[in-house]
Image (cartoon, grey):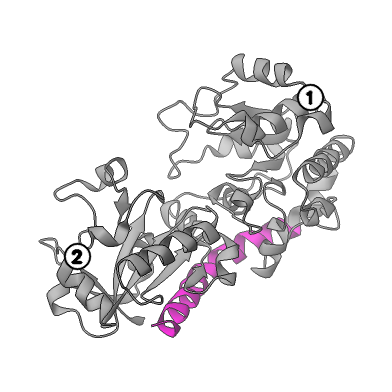
Amino acid sequence: MKTNLTFCYDRINSDGSGYPNLTKPNLDWQEWDFHWPKTVAIRLIKFFINIGYQFEETGIENASSGSWYPIGISWFDFSCDYFSLIPNNTLHLIRNRKIKILFYYHEGDNPYRISERLQSLCVEHRLPSDCYLFISANTAANNIENFLYFNDHESFFASINRRQSSEIALNTKRPYDFTILSRAHKWWRATCVADLLRNNALKNSIWSYHSDCDIGDHIDDNPIDLSRINLAVEKLQQFVDNGPYRYDLDSARYNNHRFIDLSILNQSYFNLVIETHFDADQSGGTFLTEKTFKAIKFGQPFIIIGPSHSLKLLRSLGYKTFDSVIDTSYDSIEDNTERWMRVRDAILKIKQQNLKELFDKCYEDVVYNQYHFVSRIQNNLDYIVKEINYRQ
């Protein structure tokens, strides 16, 4: 399928593809993420290639009117003046509205804050306020001018894990109740896991907590009020200090999305998805990642420990959320502490029941979700192509 999209670059590789704009020259793709300003190839290109979409890549000197100048961001740096890194000849084309910038960001940072930063930079560089389109994986993006929400992680997981089987083990009693796998240490994640642990919810479950994977999260930024759940700071600190707990994969592979250990998923009935954000960076939006789509692809009913309205988002995308079997009322609660308490109660309620019977009741929707996940690969890309073209 032809997309009618043209991406233009300051440098073109020997094979005719574009070298990521603003990225330090002569780096291997595995190095892009580790060098300032941490700009990378936009994942959209890879999605297009995998599904056979046609698009054009060209050097900036050959860019036709209406072309997009892609800037893939691995991590948005508020101290970075992205426009100052664009070559003057390219900036001239942007200033004169011949081409537009396409920022592509697969993280869930607050897009309102990003918008304020970019708009101030537009004023500073005398650029039109609409000289860019910023694609964000946070749903709040759809409420902001020049911004667009795209469920990148759904396409990403479908793409990167497309060769792994997703068979569901049926008609066998599974030895474990829940799977809950947590990667980087964040204090809200530690709060949830420690709270479940002290309430015996994780007894007979496959769980992990990588407390040694510290990304600098500060305990004062915990969106869950420890006093309201009667969890002492000292007890939480002790839980973290006593880790790491039960690594599901070794430290070299636990963040490798190309490999999923099906023996872990097929041994438990339900997946407690501990997402990347609990409040989507105070944006009021929702942010879902491969953690949720992993449970969907590999056939587990789930509870999402994440931002409010996560299930609402999934329903809007056509997925089933097991509302007749699981208490999903937690999803509409915007108060973070209250939402966590309702999530915990829902998990404890499941724990008190016959999990095989609950799983059997969910099975039809589990299979539906698997097929729907596959069917959405092209629909997702059709949507984003249409939206980008509309904003040109």
Q: Position of residue 138 (x, y in %)?
A: 56, 59
Secondary-structure class at tag 1: loop
Residue beneath the point at 31% across and 53% down: 39
Task: Judge whether 4 appears above or below 338 on screen.
Answer: below
In the image, taking residue 58 as reference, residue 289 lies left or right, namely right
Residue located beneath label 1 in the image = 231
Residue beneath the point at 25% across and 85% down: 65
Taking depth in this image into account, of 63 and 324 the one nearest to the observer is: 63
Q: Residue furthest left?
A: 14
For label 1, count other residues whose C-alpha is less than 10 Å away and answer few (under 14), some (14-19) or many (20+): some
Report which quarter residue 207 is drawn in: top right
- The boundaries of the magenta stretch are 364-392
Q: Disc 2 marks which amino acid?
A: Ser
Q: Disc 1 marks which amino acid?
A: Leu
Q: Position of residue 361 (x, y in %)?
A: 82, 53
Residue located beneath label 2 in the image = 17
